[in-house]
Amino acid sequence: MTFTYSTFEGEVVPNKTSSKPRKNIIADFTSNWDFTYIFDSRDEIWTGFHNKILTTELYLTNLFGSKTDMKQRGLDMIGYVKYKLLRFETFKLDGGIRLNLVSASEKKPFVLEPRLNITYNPIPILAFRLGIGRFSQNLTTLSNEEELISIFEPWVVVPDYLKPAEATHFIGGIDYYLTEFLKLSVEGYYKDIDNLVDINELKYTSLDPDFVQADGRSYGVDFAFDFFLQSVFFKGSYSLSYSYKKKDGIEYQPRYDTRHAVNLQFGWIFWDGWQFNAVWRFSSGLPFTGIAGYYDKWNIPDPWGQWYAQGQYDPSFLYGARNAQRLPSYHRLDISLSKSFKIFFAKIDLDVSLLNVYDRKNIFYFVRDTGERVDMLPFIPSASVRIEI
């Protein structure tokens, strides 16, 4: 039995900027009741109940000045049972079903959600993996595709007038041990998503819904290798992925769609427990909505006054196709040196880190009005000491 309670609060304060005020509050009380039985054959049966009492609050104002004040409270109660077939050396199966008994959303997802994972080892150095499952989520995060940069992505319980997001996952992979110390892996996946919750950017009045629904899909392939020795390890991975969201009949790439991603990590433990780590990351640029053109917009401060005398032309711009352009690619190298040791009754952790070692100019965003480029963090050294008594 486990019981947890957590709260979170995030807020955007406009100060002297043109941003709109936004606030998100989350409270989560979770209780899990799990039971596991292990047979003499090494097979296992798992069953239990997972309960969540969720409260979310969201207060925001969109670009048209329309306000959203929403407070949702609900109970999630699910039961599950799964069987792990572990008696064979070459064949393993993990199959089960989840039952959505009570949903935090009024329109709860389908009651039964099956999951199945199979691993087959025809020879000790080769393994085939297959997974399929149905999943749902009553708590969702909101990402506004209209924002140039996103510093506020709230979590809310799915409103009663919408359906919770549901997805079907298909995963297949191969693991191959070239030697005792070197493993290669290839994994492909496909995910079909229904009922994504999205912000309604066209909310003009209080009668318009705060959120609308969209669909999505994603697929890709991951390649990875792991090399281990007693004091040295090296890991590498490459991912080719595609993500799409479909809203109002238009399909586009969401803001976090990353086409190519590379991660390389090297670690070395030497001289009485000192550990050296180096991590290099690369990813292709994220999508963004560019400007297609400019025009002069006639603004009237007081429509009931002498509009012809008070109005003025203000420069404005037209957006192009949503997320049709991409930012430049991103890469950086981080290295660190750390050591843990004890002095009497205290445990001491030392760490020295160098972030963005070669001072790569990674773009954060372009300023829409001027086209000015704003970069992320430059080269940053840091050091820390942590003492536990």
Image (tube, helix red, strand yellow):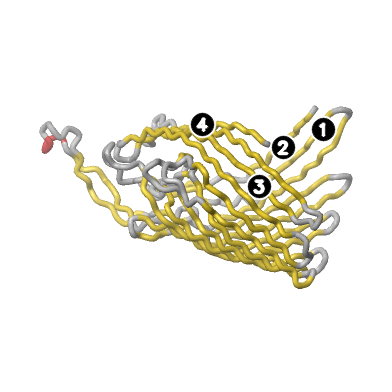
For badge 4, the amino acid type reads Glu
Which residue lies under the disc numbered 4? 9
> How many other residues sit within 10 Å of disc 4, few (<14), some (14-19) or many (≥20)?
few
Secondary structure state at the residue bearing disc 4: strand
Secondary structure state at the residue bearing disc 2: strand
Which residue lies under the disc numbered 1? 347
Which residue corresponds to the image point at 37% horizontal and 55% vertical from the top-left?
247
Secondary structure state at the residue bearing disc 1: strand
Q: Is residue 128 visible?
A: yes
Q: CA distance from mark 1 to mark 4?
A: 33 Å
Q: Viewer-nearest of labels 2 and 3?
A: 3
Q: Position of residue 194 (x, y in %)?
A: 44, 55
Query: Which of pointers 2 and 1 lies earlier in the amino acid sequence?
Result: 1
For badge 1, the amino acid type reads Lys
Query: Which of pointers 1 and 4 lies earlier in the amino acid sequence?
Result: 4
Query: Which of pointers 2 and 3 lies earlier in the amino acid sequence?
Result: 3
For badge 3, the amino acid type reads Thr
For badge 2, the amino acid type reads Ala
Which residue lies under the disc numbered 3? 47
Q: In the rendered view of the protein, which quadrant contains the N terminus? A: top right
Query: Which of pointers 4 and 2 lies earlier in the amino acid sequence?
Result: 4
Which residue lies under the disc numbered 2? 383
Is 223 placed left or right of 362 in the picture?
Answer: right
Query: Which of pointers 4 and 3 lies earlier in the amino acid sequence?
Result: 4
Q: Position of residue 88 (x, y in %)?
A: 77, 64
Query: Could you say which is closer to the camera, residue 32 or residue 67?
Result: 32
